[in-house]
Image: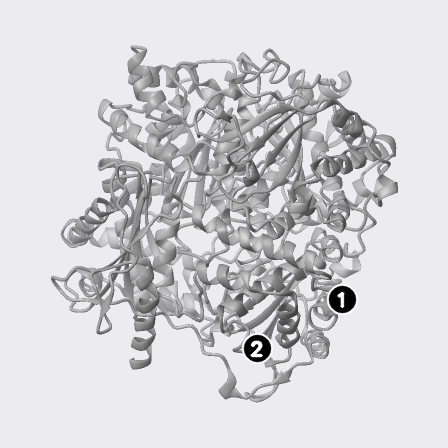
């Protein structure tokens, strides 16, 4: 849990569909090659600047972001869960697809960086187009008599209205009476670019301080406590030109929603900026910065900004730290608190803010609440802060700290990155030109072409040459006066030695686009796919949605607040925006297509050799650099690109001569007849369902084929009657116990998954563009294939992929040793990324490892050792046995009837042709390992482990309280306890004690066990101090938090958990995931949510108190594990022993890393004795 973050461009909030780099970085940051960690705590930085958010939800600013995240395949070693994370691909954005494939191939990179940009002379858009664009993008007038029509997806039944308060605040309301969830976001149009030169990080610090008390609600944790009691979360982030604050909560109670808006509005009308809070919060800023010092994203982001004109505000250091905010201000005689107040009073003005609200109340009610909560924000009638520099100070062209134009920067990364980027700055000469660019989205189409992965693509050519694992094209920095556009190639060792050749190929493709017309079908197909997405878009999470609205309000005209980030071709003519909700299957006129083509051509013509510059990342530069970046200590070189090389690129070989070509037409786009929904849902009333309606169990899948325990298949089916989309999911699992039985087997499984995905990529890429997906997972209990998307051509797609995977092995396995070594190198680099993850992630990992059987989750070291010993013949032999025997389980759910589903299973069955196994050969199911028992008065078992990254001086401690109870009552009680302690834990250890920036708590499930966990990472306290502070907090939970509980408090906590369970599913994939979880686990409790609701409603205060006593306070046999990570350097360093040893199988109080295997072995023995 954190309050605030500064975000580099790749992590910045997404509000347009034209940023594949951002999708890639987000997905890559969430990817973990080592076993998955606690669901409540992301194992890597989240979108909002590498911060752990309240309840540790990853709140993304656009639903496209969510789709990108869900598209990432589960890690090869999935932690032994019976049901690994369900992965689907649900987007038509070619750029996102590009980045998804880059994620799959670039497993070694757990972080990716923004790159630098160079100066070019901007070519202004035509006067008529720019002028019209400026005229079209205007905020709603306060006195507007006719409501503005908000264009929304056809399936979106929510009511929208936009208006301006008398104080100038722009407001967008979305009334959703069918939901109990509410979310609010405020976009303040000032960011880190507005920092005073003498106080770097002030905007970010101001963002932190707004959470710490207001005139109306002076208690520092007042808002957080309020949200916690209403099932809510809140956070914020600071971007270059904006600062966004947001929260979500249960919005079903009117007076609570009204109070929430009053509290939130007071942030902006009367923050206190108290002296005490100002002093303490400096520690949080410094801790946040310390956490980022070993993060390649932030390190490379800072180098990007160093290549910008030093007079342009984008070149500033945005995060801030004690050096800039405390020591620097003291040295200059500056009063920091006074400067905070001055910054707030200068820039926090109602006329430079945009507010979005999504809530169950009616529009009139919400108008009243908003007027009361935000009408008192002062209107200082200021101009947009960015007007001080946009179109006045050139971003490039003048010298930055690091050369840009025609130069190459060679960087030593923290992780095993090996890649090259070509970057082009795209400068805007006027507001009109910038707005026209954002309406036409030419970068979307250029990214689509350069980043395509089918036949004739850049990536296919580079793979054939053995130079690349993956490639992506996208915009990166995205400000009002410029963007940077770039192509990034993840290199092989061979490619690292052929960078000039790699770049020449890229310029060959660019020349082809400049010299030959792009086929019309490229634009037509992208529009068609984009509109299919629009046609079937339904509600996503309110938190991510409201953020996207608040951001869009600053980028698009009012009618496009919803559609702007989600549709292409936003102008019908140069003078007229689109005005209809209806999906389009083609451009309205050739002239509409020509608008997009002209904008795309203009962008392509800017991608010249003279206006480009390079960035290369490789560990091979280590010890060979001469420069060090100021804020993060990144080692790098900067040198001019030789003139001979530039001339070679300017005269790059013709694209056709090396096999490069425009993409072919996409055969996977569904036909109109194929979009027929076979069983339409009943028309529902847009109002919220009654409790009785919500508690009614959803119809579960039925068995439509049962060959018996000794037979081939058990097939489950449900024809969709709830979502009304022409989509389906096909899940096939072959149960077998030998595929993951050793670390070597697990390593071969990882290799197979990667090489199969890579070798099938040319075929599957177009399918993914057409919103069809597949996922292959080899797991401890067998192998699973998942297909999803439009059902029109899904059977054909599934049949082809299955045939290649199970029969045509030569098509999915490496063709030679060189290719095999490329895949092996990728995975080894991925595994090496474990060592440079954050200490809190390491603490969680070791705790998680201790709760899983050894043959379900192998250690990172085991996988590395095994992978190094693998060979191509071993892989071939392994794959030949993969589909040989097993027991088949399948779920067919969606727009297929019973007959069609059986036919699909028969087709796949003939393809796989496995031999059935007997029931006594079924693999064992996952069972959580019980943690060691700690008797009253004894110290809990503690793992003390040295931080793998010697350069990271942060300490971390993670405490797990394990409950082995399997009942619904046990499960909901631990969630209630988690909700109760969450905010007080954060307030005590983060706000009051200032132990660290990362402070969080939550619940994890392993099989049917549940664990309550708390974690802190600190750069100021040693691990022992962190642990003792957390134990002290836990010791006081009963007296300080549970005994004072009132019946109203309990009702609110229970209501939040009930509402979360009864919130209607927003997508077919959600229901499919839940159903498959029940099938794969063998529990078949399809009404689990309803059963847990019943358990929640029966909870009373004494149940909570008694449960805490059993779990921790007075337990005779409490199960606790402390996992500490001790830094090797810094003031809190202390090298722990590798082993403390065991005596007679009984663990010592303190264990080392080498004791974990025995700890797990003891747990396995305990399971067998239970």
Mark 2 crowd level (few <14, some 14–19, many ≥20, 10 Å Cα): few
Q: Report the mark closest to the observer, 1 or 2.
A: 1
Is residue 550 among what the camera can see? yes
Choose top left, top right, bottom left or bottom right for residue 691.
bottom left
Residue at label 1? 796
- Relative to residue 74, is residue 968 drawn left or right? left
Residue 582 pos. (x, y %): 71, 44
Vertical side of 531 occupied by 334: above or below: above
Vertical side of 323 occupied by 495: above or below: below
Q: Secondary structure at mark 2?
A: strand
Residue 812 pos. (x, y %): 71, 64
Is residue 519 among what the camera can see? no
Residue at label 2? 702
Q: Which mark is residue 1089?
A: none
Q: Secondary structure at mark 1?
A: helix
Q: Of all residues shown, which one is farthest toward the front?
A: 623
What residue is drawn where x is 59% and y is 53%? 825
- Relative to residue 128, is residue 1154 drawn left or right? left
Viewer-proximal residue among 624 and 1145 = 624
- Tell me the colour scheme of the image: one colour
Viewer-proximal residue among 449 and 738 = 738
Viewer-proximal residue among 1044 and 713 = 713
What residue is drawn where x is 33% and y is 28%? 209
Vertical side of 590 occupied by 746: above or below: below
- How many numbered discs sit on the rendered protein? 2
Choose top left, top right, bottom left or bottom right for residue 115.
top right
Residue 293 pos. (x, y %): 42, 35
Distance Cα–Cα, label 1 vs label 2: 24 Å
Residue 59 pos. (x, y %): 47, 43
Mark 1 crowd level (few <14, some 14–19, many ≥20, 10 Å Cα): some
């Amino acid at each position: 849990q954190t309050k605030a973050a500064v975000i580099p461009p790749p992590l910045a909030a997404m509000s347009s569909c034209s940023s594949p780099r951002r999708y890639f970085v987000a997905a890559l940051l969430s990817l973990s090659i080592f076993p998955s960690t606690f669901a409540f705590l992301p194992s890597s930085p989240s979108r909002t600047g590498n911060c752990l958010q309240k309840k540790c939800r990853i709140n993304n600013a656009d639903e496209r972001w969510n789709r990108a995240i869900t598209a990432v395949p589960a890690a090869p070693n999935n932690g032994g869960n019976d049901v690994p994370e369900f992965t689907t691909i649900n987007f038509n954005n070619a750029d996102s697809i590009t980045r998804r494939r880059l994620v799959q191939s670039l497993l070694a990179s757990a972080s990716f960086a923004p790159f630098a940009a160079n100066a070019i002379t901007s070519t202004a858009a035509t006067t008529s187009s720019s002028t019209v664009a400026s005229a079209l993008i205007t905020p709603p007038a306060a006195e507007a008599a006719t409501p503005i029509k908000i264009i929304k997806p056809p399936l979106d039944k929510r009511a929208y209205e936009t208006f301006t308060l008398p104080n100038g605040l722009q407001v967008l309301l979305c009334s959703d009476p069918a939901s109990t969830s509410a979310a609010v976001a405020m976009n303040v149009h000032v960011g880190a670019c507005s920092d005073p030169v003498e106080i770097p990080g002030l905007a970010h610090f101001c963002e932190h301080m707004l959470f710490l008390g207001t005139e109306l609600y002076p208690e520092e944790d007042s808002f957080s406590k309020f949200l916690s009691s209403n099932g809510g979360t809140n956070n914020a982030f600071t971007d270059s030109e904006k600062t966004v604050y947001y929260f979500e909560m249960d919005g079903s109670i009117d007076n609570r929603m009204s109070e929430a808006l009053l509290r939130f509005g007071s942030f902006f009308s009367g923050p206190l900026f108290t002296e005490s809070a100002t002093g303490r919060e400096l520690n949080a800023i410094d801790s946040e910065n310390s956490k980022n010092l070993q993060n390649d994203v932030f390190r490379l982001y800072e180098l990007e900004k160093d290549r910008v004109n030093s007079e342009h505000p984008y070149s500033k250091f945005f995060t801030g730290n004690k050096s800039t905010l405390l020591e620097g201000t003291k040295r200059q005689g500056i009063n920091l608190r006074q400067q905070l107040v001055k910054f707030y009073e200068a820039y926090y003005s109602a006329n430079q803010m945009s507010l979005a609200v999504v809530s169950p109340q009616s529009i009139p009610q919400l108008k009243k609440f908003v007027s009361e909560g935000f009408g008192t924000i002062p209107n200082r009638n200021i101009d947009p802060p960015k007007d001080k520099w946009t179109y006045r100070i050139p971003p490039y062209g003048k010298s930055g700290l690091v050369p840009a134009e025609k130069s190459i920067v060679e960087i030593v990364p923290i992780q095993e990155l090996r890649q090259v980027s070509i970057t082009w700055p795209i400068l805007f000469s006027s507001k009109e030109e910038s707005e026209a660019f954002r309406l036409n989205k030419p970068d979307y189409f250029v990214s689509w072409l350069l980043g395509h992965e089918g036949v004739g693509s850049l990536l296919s050519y580079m793979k054939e040459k053995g130079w690349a694992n993956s490639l992506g094209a996208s915009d990166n920095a995205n400000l009002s006066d410029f963007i940077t556009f770039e192509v990034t190639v993840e290199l092989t060792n061979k490619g690292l030695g052929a960078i000039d050749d790699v770049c020449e190929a890229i310029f060959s493709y660019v020349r082809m686009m400049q010299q030959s017309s792009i086929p019309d079908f490229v634009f037509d197909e992208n529009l068609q796919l984009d509109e299919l997405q629009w046609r079937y878009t339904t509600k996503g999470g309110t938190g991510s949605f409201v953020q996207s609205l608040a951001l869009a309000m600053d980028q698009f005209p009012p009618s496009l607040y919803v559609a702007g980030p989600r549709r292409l071709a936003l102008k019908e003519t140069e003078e007229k925006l689109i005005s209809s909700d209806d999906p389009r299957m083609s451009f309205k006129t050739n002239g509409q297509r020509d608008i997009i083509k002209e904008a795309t051509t203009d962008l392509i013509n800017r991608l010249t050799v003279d206006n480009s510059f390079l960035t290369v990342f490789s560990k091979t530069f280590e010890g060979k650099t001469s420069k060090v970046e100021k804020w993060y200590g990144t080692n790098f070189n900067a040198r001019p690109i030789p003139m001979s090389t530039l001339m070679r690129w300017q005269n790059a070989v013709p694209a056709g001569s090396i096999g490069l070509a425009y993409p072919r037409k996409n055969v996977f786009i569904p036909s109109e007849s194929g979009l027929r929904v076979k069983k339409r849902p009943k028309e529902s009333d847009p109002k919220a369902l009654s409790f009785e309606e919500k508690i009614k169990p959803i119809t579960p899948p039925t068995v439509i084929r049962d060959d018996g325990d000794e037979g081939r298949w058990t097939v489950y089916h449900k024809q969709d009657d709830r979502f009304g989309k022409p989509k389906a999911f096909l899940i096939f699992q072959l149960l077998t116990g030998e595929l993951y039985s050793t670390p070597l087997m697990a390593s071969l499984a990882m290799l197979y998954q990667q090489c199969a995905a890579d070798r099938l990529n040319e075929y599957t890429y177009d399918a993914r563009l057409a919103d069809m997906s597949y996922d292959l997972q080899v797991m401890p209990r067998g192998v699973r294939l998942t297909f999803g998307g439009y059902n029109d051509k899904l059977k054909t797609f599934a049949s082809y992929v299955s045939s290649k995977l199970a029969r045509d092995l030569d098509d999915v396995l490496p063709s030679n040793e060189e290719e095999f070594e490329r895949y092996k190198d990728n995975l080894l680099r991925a595994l090496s990324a474990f060592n440079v993850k954050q200490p809190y992630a390491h603490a969680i990992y070791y705790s998680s490892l201790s709760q899983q059987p050894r043959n379900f989750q192998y250690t990172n070291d085991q996988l590395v050792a095994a992978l190094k010993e693998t060979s191509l013949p071993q892989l071939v032999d392994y794959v030949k046995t993969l589909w040989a025997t097993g027991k088949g389980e399948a779920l067919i759910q969606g727009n297929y009837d019973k007959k069609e589903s059986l036919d699909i299973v028969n087709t796949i069955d003939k393809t796989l042709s496995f031999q059935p196994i007997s029931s006594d050969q079924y693999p064992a199911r996952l069972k959580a390992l019980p943690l060691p028992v700690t008797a009253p008065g004894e110290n809990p078992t503690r793992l003390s482990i040295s931080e793998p990254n010697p350069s990271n001086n942060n300490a971390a401690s993670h405490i797990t309280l394990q409950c082995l109870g399997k009942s619904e009552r046990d499960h909901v009680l631990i969630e209630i306890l988690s909700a109760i302690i969450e905010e007080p834990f954060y307030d005590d250890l983060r706000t009051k004690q200032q132990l660290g920036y990362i402070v969080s708590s939550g619940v994890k499930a392993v099989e049917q066990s549940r664990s309550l966990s708390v974690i802190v990472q600190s750069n100021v306290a040693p691990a022992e101090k962190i642990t003792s502070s957390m134990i002290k907090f836990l010791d006081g939970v009963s007296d300080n938090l549970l005994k004072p509980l009132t019946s109203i408090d309990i009702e609110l906590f229970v209501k939040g958990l009930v509402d979360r369970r009864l919130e209607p599913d927003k997508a077919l994939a959600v229901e499919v995931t839940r159903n498959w979880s029940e099938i794969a686990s063998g529990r078949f409790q399809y009404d689990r949510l309803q059963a847990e609701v019943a358990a929640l409603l029966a909870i009373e205060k004494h149940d909570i108190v008694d449960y805490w006593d059993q779990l921790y306070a007075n337990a005779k046999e409490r199960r606790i594990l402390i996992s500490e990570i001790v830094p090797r350097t810094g003031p809190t360093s202390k090298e722990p022993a590798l082993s403390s040893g065991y005596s007679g199988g009984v663990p010592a109080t303190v264990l080392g890393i080498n004791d974990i295997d025995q700890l797990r072995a003891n747990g396995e023995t305990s399971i067998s004795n239970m």
